[in-house]
Structures are given as C-alpha cells and as structure tokens.
Image (cartoon, rainbow, N blue to C red):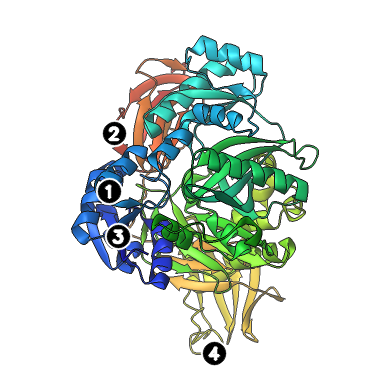
Amino acid sequence: MFDKILIANRGEIACRVIDTCRRLGVATVAVYSDADRDARHVQMADQAVHLGGPAPAESYLRGDRVIAAAQATGAQAIHPGYGFLSENPDFVDAVVAAGLVFIGPSAAAIRAMGLKDAAKALMERAGVPVVPGYHGADQDPDHLAAEAARIGYPVLIKAVAGGGGKGMRRVDDPPAFADALDSARSEAQGAFGNPAVLIEKYILQPRHIEVQVFGDGARAVHLYERDCSLQRRHQKVIEEAPAPDMTPEMREAMGGAAVRAAEAIGYAGAGTIEFIVDGANGLRPDGFWFMEMNTRLQVEHPVTEAVTGIDLVEWQLRVASGEALPARQENIALTGHAFEARLYAEDVPAGFLPATGRLAHLRFADHARIETGVRPGDAISPWYDPMIAKVVTHGATRAIALRALEQALVDTEVAGSVTNLDFLIALTRHAGFKRGEVDTGLITRDLPSLLDGGAEDRAALVLGVIGLAGLADPDIRGGATLWQPLRRTIAWEGGQAALEVTGPGAARVTLDRAHEVRWQSGRWWVDGQPCRHRVVVHPAGVGVFGGRVVHLTPLDPLARKAADGAGDGVTRSPMPGLVKAVHVTAGQTVSAGDRLAVLEAMKMEHSLTAAADGVVAEVLAKAGDQVEAGAPLIRLEPVDG
C-alpha cells in the first residue's frame, strides 16, 4: 500500500478519496486553484499545493504542475478522481514517465475506449452488442447526413471524444440535421478539442443501465448494474442500484458482456460499461447495446458501494499498489437497494441553468450518506460544476430506499443559492418512478407536473414572514417576550405582508388574505393545521424547509435594483459565463427562435435565441468575453421600428 498519494481533483470526489485514505492510513496531498484556496478538500488533506488560476486550464488541467506537486511532496501515486485529467492518456504516460503510479487504467486502455467509434469496433470484436450506427472516419457533412438517413430517424449525434452529454444532439428529421451537427461539433471542439462525431440510432424508449467493472489488468469482475435513466439534458439526476425489474438472465448477459469488454483491453482499476437498453417490452437479454466505457471512477459509484459493501476507492489503491483483484465474482454479493440524488445549485424552472451563490446555510440529513465538497459559507463558483452534494440512501427494498431518499431530501437545508432540491423531492414522489417505470425521457415528458409538484406552499411563505419578523428564534417563539401586540409591514425582495401579533406565540400574517399562525406543542400551526416546516434564519435572510422550499431575502432600502430588461429587447446572460460565439451582426434581421449567441458556463454550452422577430440594433459582447449574470449581450428593435 502507498504511504502518500496526491489527488488531482477537487470538490466532493477529492473529499471522498481522502476519507478512504484516512481509514487506510495513507497520507494525502490536495491541489487547488485560486478559487479553491479555502476549499473543504484543501483543509481535509495532509498537505496542499497551489496550481494556478481559477480556470481549469490554468490549474486542474495542468498535468505538468500536478506531477511536479506530487514529486515535491513525496507522493508515490496520483489519484485522478473523475473529470479533468482522469481520462487523459497523455497525462497517464507523463505520470509513469515521472516514476509515479497512476491510480487507474493504463494509457493504452484509456486510448482504446477514448474514441467512441474505435471503442464500438473493438467491442464488436469482443462479442459485445453495439447500437446500430455510423462510426467511420469520413466526417463530411453530406456523408454524415446520408448515414443518418440510412440508419433511420430519430438519430443521435455524439462527439467521438465526448462524455457528460457534451457534443450530443438528438435529431428527429432531416431538415434539422445540419444545424444539430454544427452545434454538436462546436461543443465537442470546445470541450474535448476534437470535433469528430458519430451517428447512432436513437432508441425511443431508452433506459440507461451501466455495469460497474473492476480489473487488475489480467482479469475483471462486475459489481452489478446501476440504472441512470433519470436524466435531464443528458445529465444524470438520480441513480439507483440495482436496476428496477432486472431479471437474472438479463443481469448475467449484461455482466458477462461488461467483463468481456474490460478484459478485452486488459483493464486495471474501476470502470463503467454504459449500455443503452430498449425498455419498450421489458428487460431482455437481446435488448441492450454498448454505448461507451468510462475509464475512471463514476460520480454515482456510492450506490454500488452501498449494495455490495465494497469500498471502490480502497480497491483502486490496492490494485494500483500491485495487489490482485480483492475478490472473485462469486464472492461479490448484492444486498438491498440504493439511490443517489445529485443536489445542484441550479435554476430548474429556468431550464436547469447552473447557478452561483454563497451558501449562507447548509445542513444535511444525519440518516443518509452525504458526499460533499462544500461547507456553510462556501461559494458555488462559476468555474466548476455546481454540485453541492450527493445524497445516498440504502434499504432492504427499493421502496424503503426511495422513501429514505425522500426523507433525506426533505431534511436537507440549503440557502444562498437556488437549488434543484424541490425538483429532486418531486421526483421521489413521482408515481411512475416509485413503481420503477423509468426511461431517459421521463423528466422531459413529465416536467410540467414535476414543477407543479412545487405549487406555492402558502404555509411556508407565511412562516418565512414570521422568520423575517424575528419571531422564529427557538428561545422566544413559544414565549411572550417579543410577542407583545404590534402591527407592522414586513417586506422582502419580491413581496410584502402585514404582520399583527395577536397574543403570546400567535400572530396574523396577511398576504392576499389573512393567515393565523401559532407555535404550540413544539411545532408551527398555520390556519389551524400542524406544519412540519423548519424556519431557519441565516445571514442571507430566512429559509423555510420541510415542505416546499421558500427563501425570503430582506429588502435593503438602500439597494437600487437594475431594470430587469423586460420588454426592452435586450438579450442578457442568464448566468456568469464565457461568450463562446456571436451569430448576428448589427442591422441583421432575425426571427423569433433564431440563435443569437452561445454562452459556455459550468462545462455546458447554452444557445441564446431571439424572443421575437426584430432587427439587431447593437451587439454588446464578442466571442471570448467573460460576462456576469444579467450582462446585456444583444439588443433588438422591432422590425418596423
């Protein structure tokens, strides 16, 4: 076993690796950027080395600096986590050349699976079923369009060097192919430095089921499957293990195919074989196809650990230090069911746009496994993925584990940024998902009802007013000290209410109508009904949790909010980001829906389109500009004006 390793990553995965290293007595070295100088993973590690500026290209993607940090601190090996350098074979070669150990697969194995087209050809030779498609070298647009027609619409354009949904576009008919191809290529070039794509048949009722594999370079085992079908914009939202309705025959077929795939490239370490599954007629051994292999530890690995009892990071360290596989296939048991929900700083109603902010308050359930890289007071940076935490639960059955996940999310409290917490809770209550009826289109198909699952929680809003009035403090809420008769107006950003104290522990809050509030028997009551809500006063205002999440920010009488731009024809940046491209010029006539510009933020590209017909009056930003949320980018005038 190693004495010291360097972790070439950040956030929750760096903290996760440090946890296992502590248990094994292995010292750790963290690396950090300017933006992460005070990050949780830096404080957890035994040593920390500064890499550079906040942009990944200035820090976490600087392999030379990472290797130099390992050598300077006496680390024997480098754990890449996931993302950044984890699947960069040139970095692996450089690590080995420096006399260090890369805790992961060989550069040759990464290269074999790094390009999706070559990987699919390799899998076909290994007897692993692959999706019908075109994986050739001819990248001429006309040729690709012809191949799409041959395969039959709908098709999926995918970056050959892709991952995480970047460089991927679904196309339903021939007229849309050219624009989708241009968009996919542009995103692929920016994300991976390689614009090449492949074309696949799009499965209409697809499920995304992946198999965890682990090898030692000579042989491999699988640790069962995970269902990752709950996705939005090709990004996973909730994962589970095992897959609902999995049959023994299907599991044996998929597990066997995954092991053949790993052994075909002499794989060492943790990896994932991702399959697309046709869920139209149940799970069948002839109804799954290889999509890609992720040659690294996955974000969702905790659900596999929960159902197998195996610490995959420990296995990584042991195999990388020269040990053989720690267990044989017949000794790996599957017990119970597990879920993982990804808690993000993002604006769900606005289209899952990434968000930023400082976490004024943060509290997690104590009955769930929490993987996080942040603490109260930390900032969600625009430079990196906006994940706040992964919430993981395990139970004897799927129903028990899902109920535990729902409760863990209800017990979670986050303030200082908008989050997808309400959305995750709504998913755990979705009738079809509770029955195990999952496919990758569920969220898109049922998005309106999932968002309406968050119809206004009037009790939460009323209790937020109580919090702003200073009446929710545990020391006073049940007494008479500050509940003397009074009347006043309570204002917050976006609204106001009249408050009248009607007696000790009792008040009337008037919004569009009056609501009676009291604190009695250790809980809040609103309009005569007991509430499970928790009122939390924090530095940024008041948060109400336990029902629909409500945040109220006190109104600053000195603040002068900028005009919101409604009706002024200005297209503004919806978040901090990099202007990747501007597609219009002054004087150009555009139609509603035309693409005006492309913004890159938090590893994704976002197309900004015209809200109405018009003429471009001003172009206020250029490609390469770093802009803040709300920054004006394009101004349109009416066609007749």
Q: Nearer the viewer, mark 2 or mark 1?
A: 1
| Residue identifier under label 3 | 30
Mark 3 or mark 1, earlier in chain: 3
Q: Which mark is residue 625?
A: 2
Q: Nearer the viewer, mark 3 or mark 1?
A: 3
| Residue identifier under label 1 | 54
Task: Compare residues 546 and 75 and report the one nearer the observer.
Answer: 75
Residue 623 lies left or right of residue 466; in this view the side is left
Furthest residue toward left: 72
- Mark 2 vs mark 3, CA separation in Å: 31 Å
Q: Quadrant of the N terminus?
A: bottom left
Residue positioned 47% across, 16% down in the render: 139
- Mark 2 vs mark 4, CA separation in Å: 56 Å
Question: Is residue 418 visible in the rendered structure shown here?
Answer: yes
Horizontal and vertical percent position of residue 357: 39, 56
Mark 2 or mark 3, earlier in chain: 3
Task: Compare residues 427 and 517 and report the one nearer the observer.
Answer: 427
Residue 457 lies left or right of residue 490; in this view the side is right
Residue positioned 65% across, 18% down in the render: 151
Q: Amino acid at mark 2?
A: Asp
Mark 2 or mark 4, earlier in chain: 4
Q: Amino acid at mark 1?
A: Pro
Badge 3, how many Cα within 10 Å: few under 14, some, many 20+? many
Mark 3 or mark 4, earlier in chain: 3
Q: Nearer the viewer, mark 3 or mark 4?
A: 3
| Residue identifier under label 4 | 479
